[in-house]
Image (cartoon, rainbow, N blue to C red):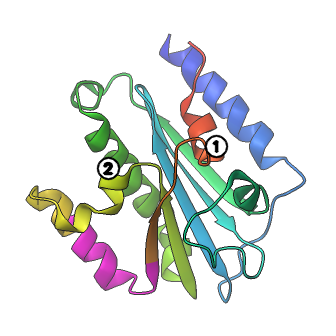
Amino acid sequence: TIEQQSSALNEAKSIILSAPWRSAFQPDKHIVLATDASMISISACIMKPPPGALKKQKLSKNDLMNLRLIDVKAKCMVNNRPFMNSSTYLKEMEAFKFGIETFEYYLKNSAQITILVDNKAVAMSRHSPILKIKLLFEKLLLEYPNAKILAIDSKTNFLADALTRIKS
């Protein structure tokens, strides 16, 4: 049921947020936003990397293990019929939009931003033929000119991915 899924999601979030590797937000530091979507939910995580951790173009799971969690949010989408019938690309775009809207405070107040998505098409969406998606990216680039978007493989995006896997 939806109540069970929401309960499981809240429990997972609680466990993650109580982890010893949490960090406080520091506006003068680099932050990382990771987003993901599954068949039934979307999630976003905001993290702080250790100095120099994101110099590489290709990130490994070990690189992401060194990130310090600031906050996470997830949203169950089972009752959202358009979402449930969407393509993977559109679900990932919804997660991307959710992450930007949810963590707007962090993004607006950060010195440097890296956004991690596990869908290469999402990372290239500024060239999308879909006007709504193109406008989302144009707005992102205008509001956050210091943002860099990186596509990573889904196995590496383990924290955002774990939040979208709700046991039903």
Residue 145 image position (x, y, % from top left): 38, 86
Secondary structure mostly taken by the magenta-highlighted segment of the chain: helix
Q: In this view, does 21 lie to the left or right of 100?
A: right
Q: Is residue 150 above or below residue 140?
A: above
Query: Disc 2 marks which amino acid?
Result: Met
Q: Could you say whether the residue bearing mark 1 is in a helix, strand or loop?
A: helix
Badge 1: few (under 14), some or many (20 or more) residues near its Cα, within 10 Å?
A: some
Q: Which of 135 and 88 is in front in this view?
A: 88
Q: Is residue 136 above or below residue 61?
A: below
Residue 66 image position (x, y, % from top left): 79, 62
Residue span colored magenta: 136-147
Q: Does the magenta stretch include residue 137?
A: yes
Seen as rendered, the residue at the extreme right is: 20
- Image quarter in which the C terminus is found: top right
Badge 2: few (under 14), some or many (20 or more) residues near its Cα, within 10 Å?
A: many
Q: Mark number for residue 93?
A: 2
Q: Residue at x 23, y 75 (%)?
A: 138
- Quarter occupied by residue 147: bottom left
Residue 77 image position (x, y, % from top left): 39, 30
Work out whether mark 2 precedes mark 1 in sequence or the reverse, and give the earlier one: 2
Residue 14 image position (x, y, % from top left): 75, 39
Q: Could you say whether the residue bearing mark 2 is in a helix, strand or loop?
A: helix
Q: Is residue 22 above or below residue 26?
A: above
Q: Residue at x 26, y 75 (%)?
A: 139
- Quarter occupied by residue 48: bottom right
Query: Disc 1 marks which amino acid?
Result: Phe
Q: Mark 1 points at which residue?
A: 158
Q: Residue at x 54, y 33 (%)?
A: 164
Q: Is residue 2 left or right of residue 93?
A: right
Q: Is residue 132 magenta?
A: no
**Are circles 2 and 1 on residues that touch, CB within 8 Å?**
no
Spatial separation of the CA atoms under disc 2 and disc 1: 18 Å
